[in-house]
Image (spheres, rainbow, N blue to C red):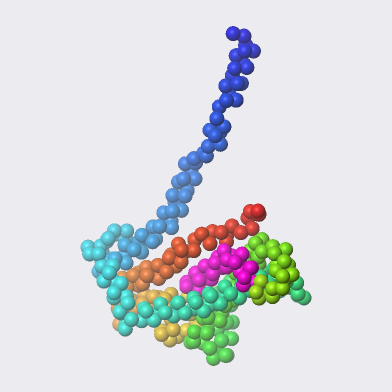
């Protein structure tokens, strides 16, 4: 067999090889280990919280933190958490839900309306307004806490729910997200066609634009809910009546009972309350995960 014939058969044999083997995904051991570390970083604190919430006050300091105690007292701790101090935990839970529904819900509505208006309507000073909003994103909330407190103190609104709800209504970051999502998901031609058919602006927004903006609205709502649910510093300086505390401030008050002259440590209830506190947030994320992922990917790929 000649050299040319062998070379021809070799090329023909390589050409008949299936191409899918070349495009098969490559596994990276380093990337797998790195993702494993991230997974452990996220799950180990949750496991520690669950394990220690199942311990009695005595077992908390008598063994390893990631090992269960002598008795599994999770249900007893839950019942004591709901009944301790005349059921103040339920009051704090209700306050937190009030702040989330009114504050985060209002922030989502206002951010949606304002972001949509900035993206789809031309009016004098629009660029200046948008520049101010972008600048507001860079200002940390802690820097505004003291001026906000002084303002609400002059208005006589401190130690009331309005001191938490009204500041929570402003979400510059949420407005920016809606603005970006509106530009990518709401075609101008669709709005013009609706106007030609005689539809008003409010009808266009609620029947057409709102449906297209649903993933973005859910994304903004999730960020607002988490921010309001975990809000600690603002309620700490605004509220002095425990009956208006959210869960964050209330559980911190329970934790501080371990120090002082009449110390009454209830760390097992603090940990159980913390576990109960994260359950609603986890449930919301699981239920709205597909909308959240869709909202985050808006604008990354154009059809």
Residue at 34% from the left image edge and 78% from the top image edge: 257
Residue at 32% from the left image edge and 67% from the top image edge: 53
Where residue 52 sits, quadrant-wise, is bottom left
Where does the magenta region start and end? 205-231
Q: Nearer the viewer, residue 122 or 142?
A: 122
Q: Nearer the viewer, residue 118 or 277?
A: 118
> Where is residue 7 drawn, in percent x and y?
62, 16
Residue 224 at least partly seen:
yes
Q: Nearer the viewer, residue 43 or 174?
A: 174
> Where is residue 79 drawn, in percent x and y?
29, 74
Q: Is residue 33 left or right of residue 13?
A: left
Main SS category, magenta section: helix
Residue 251 against residue 50 in the figure, above or below: below
Q: Is residue 91 left or right of residue 134?
A: left
222 magenta-colored:
yes
Where residue 221 sits, quadrant-wise, is bottom right
Residue 194 against residue 168 in the figure, above or below: above
Residue 234 at least partly seen:
no
Residue 118 against residue 290 in the figure, above or below: below
230 magenta-colored:
yes
Residue at 59% from the left image edge and 66% from the top image edge: 211
Q: Which quarter of the rendered picture does the N terminus lie within?
A: top right
Farthest-out residue, front = 197
> Where is residue 246 drawn, in percent x and y?
44, 78
> Where is residue 97 drawn, in percent x and y?
45, 77
Q: Is residue 79 left or right of residue 144?
A: left
């Amino acid at each position: 067999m000649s050299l040319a014939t062998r070379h021809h058969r070799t090329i023909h044999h390589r050409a008949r090889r299936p191409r899918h083997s070349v495009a098969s995904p490559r596994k990276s051991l380093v990337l797998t280990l790195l993702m494993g570390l991230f997974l452990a970083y996220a799950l180990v604190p949750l496991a520690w919280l669950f394990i220690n919430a199942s311990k009695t006050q005595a077992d908390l300091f008598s063994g390893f933190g990631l090992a269960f105690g002598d008795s599994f007292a999770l249900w007893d701790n839950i019942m004591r958490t709901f009944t301790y101090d005349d059921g103040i935990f339920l009051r704090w839970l209700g306050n937190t839900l009030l702040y989330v529904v009114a504050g985060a819900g209002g922030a989502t509505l206002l951010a949606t309306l304002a972001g949509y208006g900035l993206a789809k309507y031309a009016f004098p000073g629009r660029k200046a307004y948008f520049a101010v909003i972008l600048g507001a994103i860079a200002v940390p909330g802690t820097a505004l806490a003291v001026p906000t407190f002084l303002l609400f103190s002059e208005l006589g609104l401190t130690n009331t729910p309005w001191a938490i709800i009204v500041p929570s209504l402003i979400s510059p970051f949420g407005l920016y997200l809606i603005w970006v999502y509106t530009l990518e998901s709401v075609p101008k031609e669709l709005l013009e066609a609706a106007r030609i058919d005689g539809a008003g602006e409010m009808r266009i927004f609620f029947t057409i634009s709102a449906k297209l903006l649903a993933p973005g609205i859910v994304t903004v709502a999730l960020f607002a809910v988490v921010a309001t649910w975990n809000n600690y510093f603002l309620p700490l300086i605004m509220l002095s009546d425990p009956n208006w505390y959210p869960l964050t401030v209330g559980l911190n008050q329970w934790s501080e009972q371990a120090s002082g002259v009449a110390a009454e440590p209830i760390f097992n209830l603090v940990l159980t309350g913390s576990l109960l506190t994260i359950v609603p947030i986890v449930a919301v994320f699981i239920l709205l995960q597909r909308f959240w992922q869709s909202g985050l990917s808006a604008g990354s790929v154009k059809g």
